[in-house]
Image (spheres, rainbow, N blue to C red):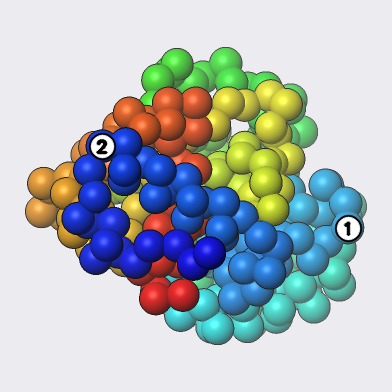
Amino acid sequence: MKPVTVPELARLHGAARRDALEQAAGYFDDRSFRAGDPVGFVWSFGNNRDREIASWMAAALAYGRVASILQGLADLNQRWEFQPHAFVTQASRVEQRKALKGFVYRWTRDQHVLGYLRGYAAVHSEGDIAQRLAQQADPRPGGYRRAVAWLAKEIRATGEPDPGHLLPDPSANSACKRLAMWLRWMVRQDEIDPGLWADVLSPAYLWVPLDTHMFRIAKRLRLTRRRLPDAEAAHKITASFARMCPEDPVKYDFAITRLGMGV
C-alpha cells in the first residue's frame, strides 16, 4: 500500500499521524530506495571497515543535487582505488595528497577531503570512536550533538589540514545536517541505514538531519515554529518525533524526505 502524501499527513494528528508515519517508514524501509541516495554509495562496499570511511565521506559531500553528489563520490572512489579503509590507514600522506590532487566538488577541494579523512583516522588511531562518542553523549533525544561536537574538536586538534566547511561545529547554532545524517547511517540499522555502530550507540539520542527540504515539510506538519532551519529547529523536530517514537525518533526521517519528493 502506498504511504500517505505530505498534505494528507498534515491533516492527521495524534495516533493517526503516528500510525501513518509508521506505515510510511515501513514502506520506504526497502533496499530499492537506496538508489538515488548517498547511502547507496555506503552499501556498495562489502565490509564494514570500508563502509565506515565511505559513510564519513559520503555524508560530508551530501549537499547539492543527488546526481552531482554521486558523481563526486564516484570520482573519489576511483582516486582511493575502491578501497577507502586501505587508503586512509595504509597510504602515506604523500600518496594520499597525490591521489586527491585536483578533486573538486562544488566548493569542496582536495585539501578539505585530505584533512577530513586524515583527521578522522588520527582520532580513530587513539581509540574506538563509537565507544568514545557513547561516553560523550547526553542521554536524551539529540544528545549525540554534544558527542559529535567533541569529535569535531578532536579532529581539528590533530594538526591535519583544515577540513573547512566539511566539518561544522555542532556546539554552534547550525543544524549540522550532514553530521546528523552520518550518525543516523552509523547507528540505525535497517534496509536503508547500515547501523555499523548499532551495538554501541542508541538511536534514541540521534537528531534529525535538517536541511531546507526537511524544514519545509516540518513546517507544513507544524513540527516547529522556528523561522530558520537551525540547531533549535532540529531540536524541536526531533523532540516532536521522540514523543511518537522515543526509542528511535529519527526513524521517520528517510520516509518523510521521500514523501516530500513525491515518491
Q: Residue furthest front?
A: 1
Amino acid carrying mark 2 in the image: Gly
Q: Which mark is residue 46?
A: 1
Judge whether 100 appears above or below 166 on screen: below
Determine whether the residue tagged by mark 2 lies in a helix, strand or loop.
Answer: helix
Tell which circle, 2 or 1, labels the residue nearer the N-terminal end. Answer: 2
Sort mark 1 into few (<14), some (14-19) or many (20+) by Cα contacts within 10 Å.
Answer: few
Count of labels shown?
Answer: 2
Residue shown at 28% from the left, 57% from the top: 9
Q: Position of residue 194 (x, y in %)?
A: 71, 48
Percent x, y of residue 146: 42, 27
State whether residue 91 is above or below residue 119.
below
Q: Residue at x 57, y 16 (%)?
A: 135
Amino acid type for the residue under numbered disc 1: Gly
For marks 2 and 1, give the CA distance: 41 Å
Residue 29 placement (x, y as % from top left): 61, 55
Camera-near label (2 vs 1) is 2
Q: Quadrant of residue 207?
A: top left
As drawn, 4 above or below 110: above
Q: Can the viewer see residue 243 in this picture?
A: yes
2 vs 176, left or right, is right
Name the secondary structure under disc 1: loop
Viewer-proximal residue, 51 or 191?
191
Q: Can residue 177 be seen from the camera position used here?
A: no
Please state if 1 lies on the left or on the right of 195 as rendered.
left
Question: In terms of image quadrants, where is residue 239?
Answer: top left
Q: Residue at 22% across / 56% down in the picture?
A: 10
Please give the label number shown on residue 259. none
Q: Residue at x 16, y 49 (%)?
A: 222
The residue to which callout 2 is attached is 14
The answer to whether mark 2 and mark 1 are in CB contact below 8 A is no
